[in-house]
Image: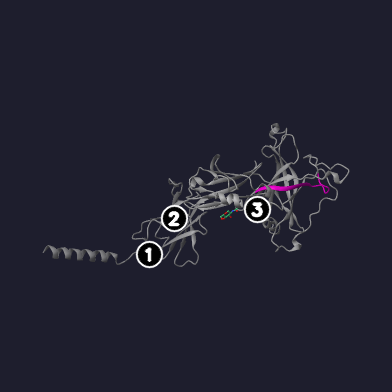
Amino acid sequence: MLEILLFGYLITCVSGQRGADVVLSCSLVEEGSGMGGMGGGAPFSRTPATLVLRDLAVTPDLSPDTLTPFNPPAVPDPNDIILEAKVTSPEIPEADLLLHADCNDQEVACEMSQYYPRDAQQGSTEPAYFIVSLQVEGGGLSLTLLLQTLSINKDQSDHPALMQSKLELPLSQSGTLLTEVVFLVFSRSQYRSAPLGGVALLDCGFRQQAQHTGQDVGLEWRLQHRGNGRRILEMRAGKRETEEEPVVHVEREGSSVDAARLTGQGNASLTLSRLKVPDEGTYICTVSSGLYQAQQVIQLHVIQPPQVSFSQEKLVFQDKLTQKLSCHCKNYYPLDVQIEWLSLGPTDSEPSIVSEQVSLSSHRQHSDGTLSLSSHLFLQPSAFPPGTTVTCRVTHAALDMPSSLSLTVQAPDPDSYWMVLGFLVITILFFYQVMK
Ligand SMILES: *[C@@H]1O[C@H](CO)[C@@H](O)[C@H](O)[C@H]1NC(C)=O
């Protein structure tokens, strides 16, 4: 359910004094109330909302014409949900990607919900927190932001602040909910593929406000695959030099996180070495610091290209019998592979696909999880005259381009009969000499 995301578009970019502002259409997701059991009502409800990110630090190559100002509604509407977030500290990493997404027509999925920090004071509604998840289409950047509401200066005007009708939180003069980013977890690559036996780096990082940087950081990496979950690694590290060594539990051999990079640079990336097929799945990077905790999800695919070979080195019809040529694809992963046969006769200009007289073996699975498959082609001498090139073309996810192997049908050797006879005569003569 949570996987279903509504896609929002970047509406406008605004030029500010220091950075740029980004306006995203979002949805506020709430657990369904009351209607849950009734007639299969949706467990979540969605309300349109807007997210305004203020003062994004961007490279100055963006021309000012691409930035158009965000105009708060002329008359504040208590039904509007407009979250305005200051993002000067911590800065949003790769903020350029958010701005460029607009120009590249990429969608940015945006979802927000209310967040309740660990050990939050019971009964207090302020400050309120929101957790916002942003994903740039195509997997270039995924962000989870924790926003904390800023208190509205009530003394400035005589009348009490307008309250947002749904959230019951005070609105600013311009009708927005003023917040600041207090913590964020991000990943710049949500899809990774790496070869069997190789190394994969799963990208995950976090940022927090400067005043919290002394705190201990907790990190957990979990793997979720086909309904099963297991912990890969857990770490707790302090920033101060006086702190004891970081506490690390490695539950998958050959997995590691650099503790110094975690506390020093906010880099929580996981290195997995000696990859095996069971390492494939959905990885969840959970970073916690103080009261805050957020996650990123990264998919890892293990890939291994097939080794393609023929059953024989030569293709010669010595008699008029049908010949079987097999094309073997060995030790590949994942399952899907396509094996095609092509034939190019001596007078043809283009190869043609051979679909008749072809049969596939069943898949064979090896102990390392890789698979093998063979395709057999039954060749009639009449359809494959000498000089015909027979090609086996293999397409697989681990291959950038299809892999092809070819054999050319050879004319039967007319001299072979005489060569065998000659060889026999010489042998007999040789033995005759020896025996004498
Ligand atoms: C973490 O460090 C690795 C190795 O230097 C780097 O490749 C990766 O981009 C960094 N990731 C983050 C999120 O900082």
Quick one: quadrant of the C terminus?
A: bottom left
Is 236 left, or right, of 324 in this rendering?
right
Q: Which residue is mark 1?
A: 410
> Which amino acid type corresponds to the residue marked 1 in the rendered image?
Gln
Q: Which residue is mark 3?
A: 137
Q: How would you rate the neighbour count of disc 1 (Cα within 10 Å): few for under 14, some for 14-19, many for 20 or more?
A: some
| Residue at the farthest left position | 436
Disc 1 to disc 2, how far (Cα)? Answer: 25 Å
Q: Which residue is mark 2?
A: 307
Does dot 2 land on a helix, a strand or a loop?
Answer: strand
Asked if marks 1 and 2 touch (Cβ < 8 Å), the reply is no
Quick one: quadrant of the N terminus?
A: top right
Q: How would you rate the neighbour count of disc 2 (Cα within 10 Å): few for under 14, some for 14-19, many for 20 or more?
A: few
Q: Is residue 209 visible?
A: no
Q: Is residue 234 magenta?
A: no
Q: Measured along the vertical axis of the image, is residue 192 above or below residue 430?
A: above
